[in-house]
Structures are given as C-alpha cells and as structure tokens.
C-alpha cells in the first residue's frame, strides 16, 4: 500500500480527533471503573480487564495510524479481497467458533469477533461498488437487487450467529449508504418495508427474541426473569440522578447488571456520572457525527463521500442503538457502545474506521477556494460526485455551479 504524498493534502480534521480522544479516555476510565471488582473476583487482578482493553487500544491506535496514512482510494483495490475474507471468517465462526451468551460469534478463544470486522468490511466494499455504479444504481436489476442479495448474505450469516443487533446495524447502515450514493426514495421505502418484514419474521420465529420483545413492551412484567437485566439497568440510571454517585462508586456493577462492562456500560456511566455525564457523552457523539458528515460532504469524489458517510453512520447508529436499549426505548440486543464498552474487536475496528475517516479528511475540498483556478477544479469535482444527501442539497449545488 502506498502512503499519501504531501502535495494537495490538508491537515487531519482536528475536531474529529478531539472527539475521538475524549471518547477513548472516557471509555478506558469507565472500563476500569466497571471491572476492577470483577477482575479481582475472577482473576485476583483489579486491572485485568483494563490492561486487556489498553492492549486492544494500542492495536487499534496502530490500525488508525496506518489507515489514516494510506491514501483512501488504495482500499478500493482490496475491497473484494477484504469482503471475501470477511465472509470466510463468518462461515468459519459457525463451524469452529466459541459459543457464549447464547451465540456462536467468537474465534481464538473469544479474542476475535468476525461480525465486528464485517461492519467495516461491508462499508469499504459497498462504497466502492456504489460509487462505481453511477446512475445505474437507480435500476432495479443492476442496483437494488444485487445490493439486496449482498446484504442478505452478510446479515444472514450474522443471524446464524444469533446476533440480530449487528445484522440490523449493517442492514440500516448499508441502506443509508445506498440512498446517499444516489438511490431513489421509492427504493429506500421498498427496502425499508421488506427489511422490516424480514425483521418481524425473524423475531416471531425465535422464542427468545419474542420474549425480549415482550419484555420491551412491559419491562417490569418479569422482574426476576427476562426483565431482570433491563430492570437493574434502569435502577442504575435512576440512582445516578443528575450528578451521579461519583466515579467508581456504582453499586449496580457489583453483580447486579449482567455484562455491565460491555453492553450495559452506559448504565454504569449514568449511575456514576449522572445525567450530566450521559449528556456529555451524547454531545461527544454529536460532535463526532458532525465532523464525520462534514468530511463526507467535502470529499472530492463519490467514493470518499459514501465511505465517510458509511463509517460515520455505522458508529453513530451503533451508539444510538446501545443507548436506546439501555434506556428501554429499543428492544434489548447485544450491541456495544463504540469506544466505551469493553471489547477488543469492536475497539480495534472502530478505530481503524476512524483512521479511514481521517484519510478522507486530508483530501477534502476547501469551503472557499482562494483562487479562481482552485474554485474551478473544486466545482468540476463536485459535478462528478453523483451523490447527494437530499434533493434540496442537490439543487443548491446545481445552482452554485451555474
């Protein structure tokens, strides 16, 4: 892989780096706070989980630096290989994977979760595929049907691992990318209806998912059974109040909330840092989303726009789902909170995705080109992007180009 040359490059998006840095610091802090008792109980080491997370952070940082330094178009050459390798791992985990928490999702004794790689791999491949289609994306035969088959294969393999949350996240992210790349509104509506129907079918045919849906509708109907976890999570958020009990002073993490350091870490954060802490976290994700979409809109080509949009959507949708589950506004599903939850695969591939975002940010077009020649070049690039966020946005760009 070739790294970027200095010519025509901008500085990395420093506000995105600030948001990421603060999220990572908060994440490492909360992992230690949520696991020191568990680490001592299971391994006689209060820092056991923290040190493992720190190791994964180091690997993720290396991945971020490499991804940020490599010219982002380079990944187009390997998109098929990356997707093919990911599909192979998704099949392999069904044969040789470790079974935990009712699902078979892990390899190498729980160290690697291929579905986390799939989140990033599908974005890289779809960004390449969609940006190469141009106006053909609006054709059912060459656009929507192949797209639906691809997403169906990936999500189907993940559903076989009993991971409905990740499958839903990938489907929603991919559909958003399809629309941003130029898909029509009717395609979006048809895909959404069919996807919702498939989701309902999967839930109705699975007793444990149907039980989770019933608990979502009435969280306190079975307080010592299916509703135990969500009940304890809501207690943690309620006890935290506005200012929280204080960092490290959570009570619910002492065996009351299952997986309090992974899927339920937002509840521990709310209990210790209160409403103020949860709002601060939401604002950090909002800053991340703003900079991510800003990078996407300023990208010089369609591939950069779709790639940056996909990475941003994946991370933000994942955060929304996790916080929605913890606050009982969404049905329970096992989705980690990006950069905050304990988990190596999630942290590494999320940081690598941010590295790709930073690589795109170095090629973004300036808002106000200082010279006429630069403005003409930028306008030419914008005309060739074939992407849009909305019809109104497309009309504004056309008027500016005229």
Image (cartoon, helix red, strand yellow):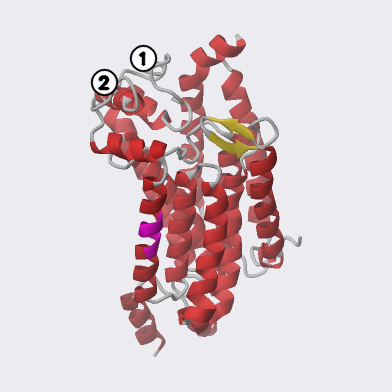
Residue at image position (59%, 77%) is 132
Q: Verify CB contact (< 8 Å) between mark 2 and mark 1.
A: yes
Q: Earlier in the sequence, mark 2 or mark 1?
A: 2
Q: Residue 78 at what x, y percent from top left?
A: 71, 63
Span of residues in magenta: 194-198
- The Cα atoms of the two marked residues, 2 and 1, are separated by 9 Å
Q: Main secondary structure of the magenta part?
A: helix
Magenta stretch encompasses residue 31:
no
The reply, left or right, for residue 130 in relation to residue 88 is: left
From this viewpoint, which residue is outermost toward the right? 1
Mark 2 Cα-neighbour bin, 10 Å: few <14, some 14–19, many ≥20: some
Q: Residue 71 at what x, y percent from top left?
A: 67, 63
Image position of 238 with respect to 112: above or below: above
In which quarter of the view is residue 301 placed? bottom right
In which quarter of the view is residue 395 placed? bottom left
Residue at image position (67%, 63%) is 79
Residue 12 visible to an observer of this rendering? no
Residue 231 visible to an observer of this rendering? yes
Task: Identify the residue position indicated by label 1 in the image.
Answer: 251
Task: Identify the residue position indicated by label 2 in the image.
Answer: 239
């Amino acid at each position: 892989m070739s790294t970027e040359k200095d010519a025509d490059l901008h500085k990395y998006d420093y506000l995105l780096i600030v948001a990421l840095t603060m999220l990572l610091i908060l994440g490492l802090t909360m992992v230690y706070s949520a696991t020191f008792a568990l680490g001592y109980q299971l391994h006689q080491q209060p820092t056991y989980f923290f040190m493992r997370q720190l190791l994964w952070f180091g690997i993720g940082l290396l991945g971020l630096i490499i991804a940020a330094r490599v010219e982002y178009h380079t990944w187009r050459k390997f998109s098929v290989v990356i997707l093919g390798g990911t599909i192979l791992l998704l099949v392999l985990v069904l044969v040789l994977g470790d079974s935990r928490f009712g699902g078979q999702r892990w390899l190498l004794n729980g160290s690697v979760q291929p579905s986390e790689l799939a989140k990033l791999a599908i974005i890289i491949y779809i960004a390449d595929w969609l940006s190469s289609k141009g106006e053909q994306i609006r054709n059912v035969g060459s656009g929507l049907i192949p797209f639906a088959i691809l997403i169906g294969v990936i999500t189907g393999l993940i559903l076989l691992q009993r991971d409905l949350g990740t499958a839903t996240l990938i489907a929603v992210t991919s559909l958003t990318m399809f629309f941003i790349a130029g898909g029509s509104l009717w395609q979006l509506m048809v895909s959404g209806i069919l996807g919702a129907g498939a989701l309902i079918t999967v839930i109705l045919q699975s007793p444990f998912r149907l039980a989770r849906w019933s608990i979502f509708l009435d969280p306190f109907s079975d307080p010592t059974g299916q509703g135990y976890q969500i009940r304890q999570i809501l207690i943690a958020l309620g006890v935290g109040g506005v200012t929280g009990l204080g960092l490290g002073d959570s009570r619910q993490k002492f065996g009351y909330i299952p997986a309090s350091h992974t899927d339920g870490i937002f509840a521990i954060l709310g209990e210790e840092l209160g409403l103020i802490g949860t709002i601060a976290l939401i604002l950090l994700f909002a800053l991340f989303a703003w900079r991510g979409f800003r990078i996407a809109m300023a990208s010089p080509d369609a591939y950069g726009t779709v790639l940056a949009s996909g990475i941003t959507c994946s991370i933000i949708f994942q955060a929304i789902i996790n916080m929605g589950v913890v606050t009982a506004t969404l049905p329970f599903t096992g989705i980690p909170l990006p950069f905050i939850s304990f988990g190596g695969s999630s942290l590494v591939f999320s940081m690598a995705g941010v590295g790709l975002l930073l690589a795109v940010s170095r090629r973004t077009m300036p808002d106000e080109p200082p010279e006429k020649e630069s403005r003409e070049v930028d306008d030419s690039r914008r005309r060739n992007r074939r992407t849009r966020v909305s019809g109104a946005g497309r009309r504004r760009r056309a008027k500016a180009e005229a």
